[in-house]
Amino acid sequence: MPIATADLIDAVPDAPSCDTQFVHYGRKLKMEGRIRTVRVSGDNALVKQTLATPGAGAILVVDGGGSLHSALVGDLIATSALENGWGGLVIYGAVRDTAILQTLYFGIKALGSNPRKSAKSGAGDVDVPVGFGGITFTPGHYLYSDEDGIVVLPEPLEI
Ligand SMILES: O=C([O-])CC(=O)C(=O)O
């Protein structure tokens, strides 16, 4: 049973928790793992490319600038992430194909949805620190996410 984020914060009161309110789109509501990141603006080629590589249990945090104008992930990219061993997705932006996403046993948090697809130029950055909701998501740090929210620590808590 993974540690609940509320218990984690009680144990480490200074741990950063994300103020952004996300919607769960996948069936898996609890996820944890090392952080990897992508920062993009209305373009999801780097998201797709990154999630096509082995995830080794990492959580991909996608900083889409909070834009809900186009979807950064749909069912094909989410399925690819699941099949490549990613631990889950936190998307500061939109998804689509949500009826299918909710059938996947995979952690997918996003701000909302939009059926419009994103551009595919490949612009953006991979594995840079990104920030939203008052906290920084640093590649290599450890992320816990559940129904209550998201907490990050430099290293997983030893209990
Ligand atoms: O390809 C895209 O832009 C997103 C999408 O629809 C999918 O992942 O199925």
Image (cartoon, helix red, strand yellow):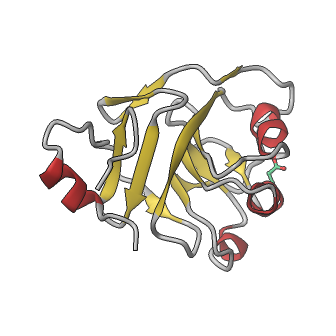
The residue under the point 23% across, 38% down is 15
Instruction: Please count the marks in the image.
Output: 0
Image vertical order of residue 72 relative to residue 83, above or below:
above
Q: Quadrant of residue 97?
A: bottom right
The residue under the point 81% across, 62% down is 83
Q: Is residue 128 visible?
A: yes
Percent across and percent down for residue 63 are 55, 32
In the picture, which quadrant includes the C terminus? bottom left
114 to the left or right of 65: right
5 to the left or right of 63: left
112 or 144: nearer the eye?
Answer: 144
Percent across and percent down for residue 12 are 17, 44
The residue under the point 58% across, 19% down is 128
Percent across and percent down for residue 121 are 86, 25
The residue under the point 21% across, 60% down is 6
Residue closest to the far front: 159
In the picture, which quadrant includes the N terminus? bottom left
Q: Is residue 62 visible?
A: no
Percent across and percent down for residue 7 are 20, 61
